[in-house]
Image (cartoon, rainbow, N blue to C red):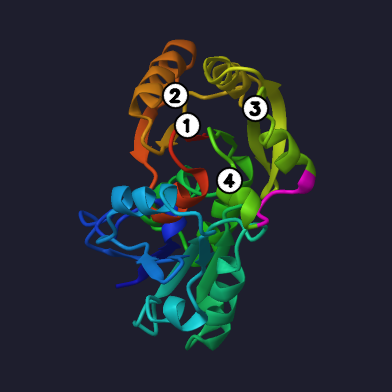
Amino acid sequence: MKFKIVVDSSSNLKSDYLVDKKDIGFSVAPLTIRLKDEEFIDDDKLDVSDMLKKINSSSEVGHSSCPSPNDFLKYFNEDESGYTFVATITSKLSGSYNSALVAKESSVDPSKVLVIDSLGTAGTIVLIVDKLVELIEKNLSFAEISKKILRFRDSLNLLFALDKFDNLVKNGRINKIVAFIANLASIKPLCYADNGDIKIKEKIRTFKGVLKRIVYNIGKMCEDTKNRVCIISHTNNLVSASLLKKEIEQSYEFKEVRIMDNRGLCAFYSLDGALIVTF
């Protein structure tokens, strides 16, 4: 097997995502969420609904931990002539990227491993995986794919709206200004990823208003949508995700608008009602 793609579980992907791609290996390195004495491993078996129920009913502050270098290393391509691409959650919010870099240096041939800081999460990583598959199937060299995938990564955008910022705030994943505004009952901030950091794009008063501004800002952030895919990741908010999908499809010419569920890590930080839009 010449090529292997490895992601961490912030991608929301399960291990069978590329099951139909027989010539491309695929693995998901799980992050872990801890709540008091209970540990939730963000793998295919995780019951996300059960995890959220326990989080919502607990007064304890939960924490997450990234895969260790050894966790990553065991998923790398075992074929010495093969190549491995690793895509992780933004390095600004997690140690996952640095952990994967350590794994790379411990691999049989580090020159055959590319670790990609997605500068985002959720759909950002999904889009990177899909692009990697496209490039691999064009029979490009490892060097050519590496150059093109980093350029593609830099072209991606992420917008998100949360109903609750509790776990992001408690775990220090956002700066004090964003945390202060996020905790104002009268404000629903529309946020975006800026080189991997979380920043506020607009301060809006209703969640319905946030949906409208997401649609508007897609056009401001991305002039040409024809050859792009848009992914809407949600946490127990299929109604809003479906409404948003309809509005986006009516306003733009994306190749596809896809709805996905937030799994363990993304659900833990975004909590119920969240929408994460990548394009």
Cα gap from disc 2 to disc 3, whole angstroms: 34 Å
Q: CA distance from mark 4 to mark 3?
A: 13 Å
What distance separates the C-alpha of mark 1 from that of mark 4? Answer: 32 Å
Circle 2/circle 4 CB separation < 8 Å: no
Q: Which residue is mark 3?
A: 185
Q: Is 103 left or right of 129, judged from the image as shown?
A: right
**Residue 120 visible to an observer of this rendering:** no
Which quadrant of the view contains residue 7?
bottom left
Query: Is residue 110 placed above or below 245 in the rendered structure?
Result: below
The residue under label 2 is which amino acid type? Answer: Phe
Disc number placed over residue 228 in the picture, else none: 1
User: Which of the two marks, 3 or 1, is nearer to us in this view?
Assistant: 3
Residue located at (67% from left, 57% from top): 92
The amino acid sitting under disc 4 is Asp
At 61% from the left and 40% from the top, the residue drawn is 155
Q: Which of pointers 2 and 3 indicates the residue nearer the eye?
A: 3
Q: Quickly name the residue at label 4.
A: 166
- Contact check, label 3 and label 1, Cβ < 8 Å: no
Residue interval drawn in magenta: 172-176
Q: Disc 2 or disc 4, which is closer to the eye?
A: 4
The image quarter in which residue 76 lies: bottom left
Q: Which mark is residue 174?
A: none
Taking the magenta stretch, the answer to whether it contains residue 26 is: no
Q: CA distance from mark 2 to mark 1?
A: 5 Å
Pick whichever, 24 or 70, lies toward us: 70
